[in-house]
Amino acid sequence: MTFVIGKECIDAQDHACVDVCPVDCIYEGARKNYINPNECIDCGACEIVCPEVAIFPSRKIRGDEERQQFTTDNAEFFTVRLAGLDEPLGDPGGAQQHGPVAADTPLASGWPEK
């Protein structure tokens, strides 16, 4: 299991989750943050502090099509080549050392603006 960031984060990147993450696995996209499922240790600290209530455990997607969509999307941020990047992001080993990514997945980049 890992944690996932949903639609509530789009255009509302508060970064409280980033500040509390003990393993630095929350990466900043252009419009939304993403949790690296291979780096997340499932501690839940991010879910508790998110003022947008955008973060949920992937185990709670059963029967919820939108959450399933964002669970897949969250993983794709790291596994598909995003616009403007030469290759997939992969597992860089920490968001702070990598820095913000000036791209989003097609789902987040195509989401209607708030």
Image: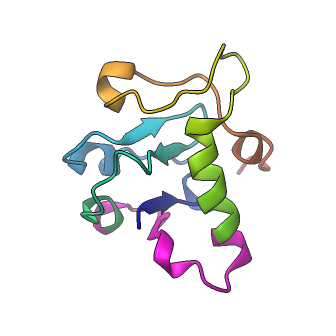
- Residue 60 rendering spot, x and y as whole percentages: 51, 80
Of all residues, the one furthest to the left in this rendering is 22
Query: Is 92 covered by the magenta stretch?
Result: no
Q: Is residue 6 left or right of residue 97?
A: right
Q: Is residue 51 visible?
A: yes
Identify the image quadrant of residue 32: top right
Q: Which residues are magenta?
A: 48-67
- How many numbered discs, if any? 0
Q: Is residue 7 visible?
A: no
Q: Is residue 4 above or below residue 65?
A: above
- For the rendered model, the colour scheme is rainbow
Q: Nearer the viewer, residue 6 or 90?
A: 90
- Residue 12 rendering spot, x and y as whole percentages: 53, 48
- Residue 97 rendering spot, x and y as whole percentages: 30, 20
Q: Is residue 58 left or right of residue 40?
A: right
Q: Nearer the viewer, residue 87 or 67?
A: 87
Q: In percent of the image, x 40 and y 21: which residue is there?
A: 99
Q: Is residue 62 above or below residue 74?
A: below
Q: Is residue 18 above or below residue 91?
A: below
Q: In percent of the image, x 28 and y 39: which residue is there?
A: 24
Query: Is 51 covered by the magenta stretch?
Result: yes
Of all residues, the one furthest to the bottom in this rendering is 63
Position of the N terminus by quadrant = bottom left
Q: Is residue 104 left or right of residue 111?
A: left
Q: Is residue 16 left or right of residue 69?
A: left
Q: In percent of the image, x 61 and y 26: which residue is there?
A: 88
Q: Nearer the viewer, residue 18 or 79?
A: 79
